[in-house]
Image (cartoon, rainbow, N blue to C red):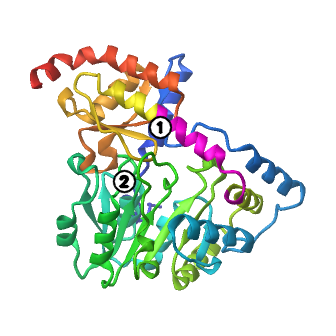
Amino acid sequence: MKLAERMNRILVESAFEVLVRARALEAQGRSVIHLEIGEPDFPTPAHIVEAAKQALDQGWTHYGPTQGFPELREAVAAYVSRTRGIQVGPERVAIVPGGKPIIFFPMLALLEPGDEVIYPNPGFPIYESMIRFLGATPVPMPLVESRGFSFDLELFRAKLNDRTRMVILNSPQNPTGGVIPAEDIEAIAGLVRERDLLVLADEIYSRIVYEEAPVSITRFPGMLEKTILLDGFSKTYAMTGWRMGYGVMPEWLVEAVNKLMVNSNSCTASFTQRAGIAALTGPQEPVERMVREFRRRRDAFCRGLNQIPGFHCTVPGGAFYAFANVKETGIPSKELADFLLQEAGVACLNGGAFGEYGEGYIRFSYANSYENLMEAVERIKKAAVRWQPAAALRS
């Protein structure tokens, strides 16, 4: 037997590949600072864990509704309405195991071969992977540092055409930490409102923001009916291993997602949904405390990176990633990322793994302790002797 041809079109997420290599080095006795994986290093808040324990004791261990328990969908609808300044009901909410199904299932339900999808590049690798897997055409939207890694609206206008079926927005963004300004979101809404397409608004980092809060495209006239809003519990509540996300979308699309859910996962785990209710309705101070610490780490880590020859790092507005420009080192970003892992013991990601416009950058996750981040800066400084002469000549 051979694998189906479509398997040649599916990609992987490089963060997990680098993690495997880093673990192998650790097994050999090497010290590695993990700045490759995008997950909070904080524990899941205690009241959420306690809610899950109680749910297990109370017997929430069986199948639940494919769309999610009504109580959780009501909590999600209330939370989204409050945080986005819109009004949505539980009938628009689909609960799924993790955030990725809200990328894959709507694409699977909507896209035909030849349809075009405009997506951010550099961007979360799963966007392009799923577009290609389904036989649709990925249309990269370059995110450039000089624009704060936001959309070039004129270029976006030029890329829109009658074959465009989906536009993907991610703000705050992975891997750059960029936040799309409110006026640009409003302009994008104006450009797509009358077109036969849907917007996938990946807002998984919506609570991890440091200056101006991101604006959801759903709040602009006519866009609630044209948007798939993706959010979840992994990043905000340090629940990556709990595997629970949700989408808010038009009811007709919820029905399609339900069909795909019942054919693949049946339902999201019942006891984790009870924990999800506690996350949304319980104390939010743990989230606020986590974001304050991320801000402290961001400021110190970016300041440290900017002292390394050949490195330039724009301070990100959200998420927990530093996307450092390393072009002046004269070393291709994949080669540099491999070198930092092997020689400096700092696990990080080649920016090119996030798309062609990420070449020349390195993504560091500062979801690690302040002390480890400062140690990582010192290790990179020591390793910089390899490229320091070339960087000096360029400056």
Q: The residue under label 2 is which amino acid type?
A: Val
Compare residues 262 and 311 and report the one nearer the observer. Answer: 311
Q: Is residue 316 left or right of residue 246?
A: left
Say whether disc 2 or disc 1 marks the residue closer to the N-terminus.
2
The picture places residue 93, in percent across and down from the top left corner, at 60, 74
Residue extending farthest left = 393
Magenta: main secondary structure equals: helix
Mark 1 highlights which residue? 295
Compare residues 293 and 372 and report the one nearer the observer. Answer: 293
Circle 1 sits in a helix, a strand or a loop, which is it? helix
The picture places residue 325, in percent across and down from the top left corner, at 26, 36
Q: Residues within 10 Å of mark 1 (few under 14, many from 20)?
A: many
Answer with the quarter of the image where residue 74 lies: bottom right
Circle 2 sits in a helix, a strand or a loop, which is it? loop
Q: Which residues are magenta?
A: 280-296
Mark 2 highlights which residue? 179
Q: CA distance from mark 2 to mark 1?
A: 15 Å
Q: Is residue 113 left or right of residue 276?
A: left
Q: Residue at x 47, y 65 (%)?
A: 103
Report if residue 262 lies within the magenta region. Answer: no
* 230 up-or-down from 24: above or below: below
Say which mark, if any, is on residue 338. none
Q: Is residue 165 left or right of residue 252?
A: left
Q: Residue at x 45, y 45 (%)?
A: 210
Q: The residue under label 1 is which amino acid type?
A: Arg
The picture places residue 62, in percent across and down from the top left corner, at 81, 65
The reply to whether residue 53 is in sight is yes
Q: Residues within 10 Å of mark 2 (few under 14, many from 20)?
A: many
The reply to whether residue 5 is in sight is no
Q: Residue at x 61, y 46 (%)?
A: 287
Compare residues 346 and 50 and report the one nearer the observer. Answer: 50
Q: Is residue 144 left or right of residue 93?
A: left
